[in-house]
Image: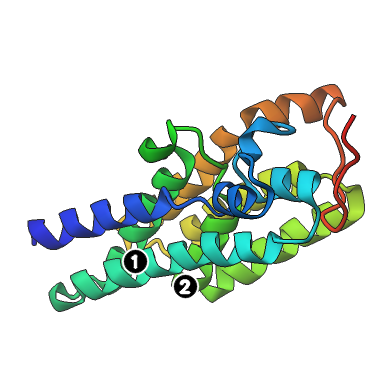
Amino acid sequence: MAYPIIIAVLAGYLLGNLNGAVCISTLLNHEDVRDRGSGNAGFTNFTRNYGIAGAGLVMLIDAGKAVMACLLGGLLLRPYGLETEGMMLGAVSVSLGHDFPALLGFRGGKGILSGFACIIVIDWRSALIVGLVFGLAYLLTGYVSLGSVLGAATYALCYGIFWREHPWVMAGGIFLGLLALFMHRQNIVRLVKGQERKTNLFQKEKRK
């Protein structure tokens, strides 16, 4: 079983290196999104700087790679009766590749979009709850980061509740939630200090 695990991990990590925001900003705007705004290679920084144009392609790439990694991991471990564990292995691998992409100098995104795509594939119940928490937090406050932080905490909590009988799946889901919180540590500090910026995901910010 070692070879399927290794293939799932490597394939998932390499897929994670395919960053939608970097690809689309380079193709359409001839610049790296990481040279703009917060310097993050994520969906929020992309929309802040380029607006909704191209955002659908960013979502397609980041969500698509996550789904592919999960399905591949599940397919590889299905013969061993560990399909869901395989999907979680793919989810963890693609998230690490997205957050810490070796092919992009380890400057990636924060994994919210790709992580949400993974949870849709693995557990629709948790996806629904996480989506509601994120959506309500953003609509009520205008802070994408607050929605992401609360969504990440809910992500970990849902896996802890729904997957107690599958320890590896539970552990992977909790890890992904905590990883997203770690990636948002600076946002958390700014939120506490009242220094975080609100974001209109449907309109780009004016450049100074």
Q: Are marks 1 and 2 in contact (CB under 8 Å)?
A: yes
Q: Which residue is mark 1?
A: 87
Q: CA distance from mark 1 to mark 2?
A: 8 Å
Picture coordinates of residue 55, whole percent (x, y) = 70, 60
Residue depicted at x 90% and y 54% = 140
Q: Quadrant of residue 163?
A: bottom left
Q: Which residue is mark 2?
A: 121
Is residue 71 shown above or below 33?
below
Q: Quadrant of the N terminus?
A: bottom left
Q: Quadrant of the C terminus?
A: top right
Q: Report if residue 169 is visible in the image.
A: no
What SS does tag 1 mark? helix
What amino acid is at disc 2? Answer: Val
Residue depicted at x 14% and y 77% = 79
Q: Classify residue 184 as left or right of residue 103.
A: right
Picture coordinates of residue 19, whole percent (x, y) = 51, 50
Most distant residue in the front direction: 30
What amino acid is at disc 1? Answer: Met
Q: Report if residue 9 is visible in the image.
A: yes
- Within 10 Å of disc 2 (Cα), the crowding (few <14, some 14-19, many 20+) is some
